[in-house]
Image: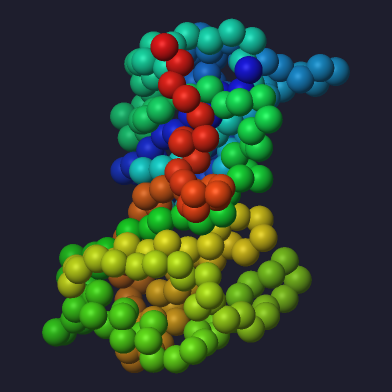
Amino acid sequence: MKIRIKFAKRGSLKFVGHLDTMRYFQKLIRRAGIDIAYSEGFNPHQKLSFAQPLGVGMLSEGEYVDIEVNSTFSSREAIKRMNDANVDDLEILSYRRLSDNAGNAMASVAAADYMIELREGKRPVSFDFLREFTLFINSSDKITVLKETKKSQIETDIKPYIYKFGGDNEKLTIRLSCGSVTNIKPELVMEAFCKYINFEPPPFTFIYTRLEVYGINDKGYIPLEAFGDDII
């Protein structure tokens, strides 16, 4: 059966890259006694796939990994077992069974919510984050940036991929297109925003936290965990 696990990545774990996070999960699943399925062949490996890789330096309250298991504990028991075997800055938040025809996490990603905060001591004088960002969004029909590809840089209008935003004078929450088709990083949005307000940000000005990752169905954007059900 297919299982979708939601987890948070906090504190110093923001410096751990995606490949090391994958290796860690393989060990965590074994330590927790999860009956994970393995591929066949000469080099069997755990059937495990992550949704959208998290950039180094970014915190998260909404990461996802899909696994296949031969048998399973209840959601409550599986969460407890994994958190008991876990490190302090990584927490398992949900463990849900997916239907057999559900798409995998990586293919399901359509959008993500981010929180962007100004690090203490980095705030420009008389700065209201939400007000300034609203003026930035409304200032033009297009927001053109240079977006890196594997082979070059291309000019891209990112405004259609900024789906919603909110916040207050100290922080911003923003929903961006995410996934394999069009992936807009919050750092790219902040780069264009800072250029608009003529602010040259010192290194490490912004703290980025991914809050949630969404798929899409006939009801609109829904969290990836909502595609599954708790196991009683």
Quadrant (top left/top right/bottom left/bottom right) for the C terminus: top left
Residue depicted at x 39% and y 67%: 164
Place of residue 111 in the rendered image (x, y in percent of width and height, measured from the top left) = 51, 56
Place of residue 139 in the rendered image (x, y in percent of width and height, measured from the top left) = 39, 91
Residue depicted at x 75% and y 71%: 151
> Is residue 54 in sight in this rendering?
no
Q: How is the image coloured?
A: rainbow
Above or below — where is 85 with respect to 54? above
Residue depicted at x 37% and y 15%: 76
- Relative to 67, 115 lies left or right: left
> Is residue 86 in sight in this rendering?
yes
Above or below — where is 130 with respect to 56? below
Residue 156 location, quadrant: bottom right
Which residue is at the far right? 41
- Relative to 141, 45 lies left or right: right
Place of residue 216 in the rendered image (x, y in percent of width and height, measured from the top left) = 55, 50
Above or below — where is 31 with respect to 168? above
Give the total number of marks visible in the rendering. Answer: 0
**Between residues 143 and 147, which one lies in front from this camera angle?**
143
Residue 77 location, quadrant: top left
Which residue is at the far front? 218
Residue depicted at x 85% and y 18%: 41
Above or below — where is 209 with respect to 10? below
Quadrant (top left/top right/bottom left/bottom right) for the N terminus: top right
Place of residue 159 in the rendered image (x, y in percent of width and height, measured from the top left) = 50, 78
**Between residues 180 and 56, which one lies in front from this camera angle?**
180
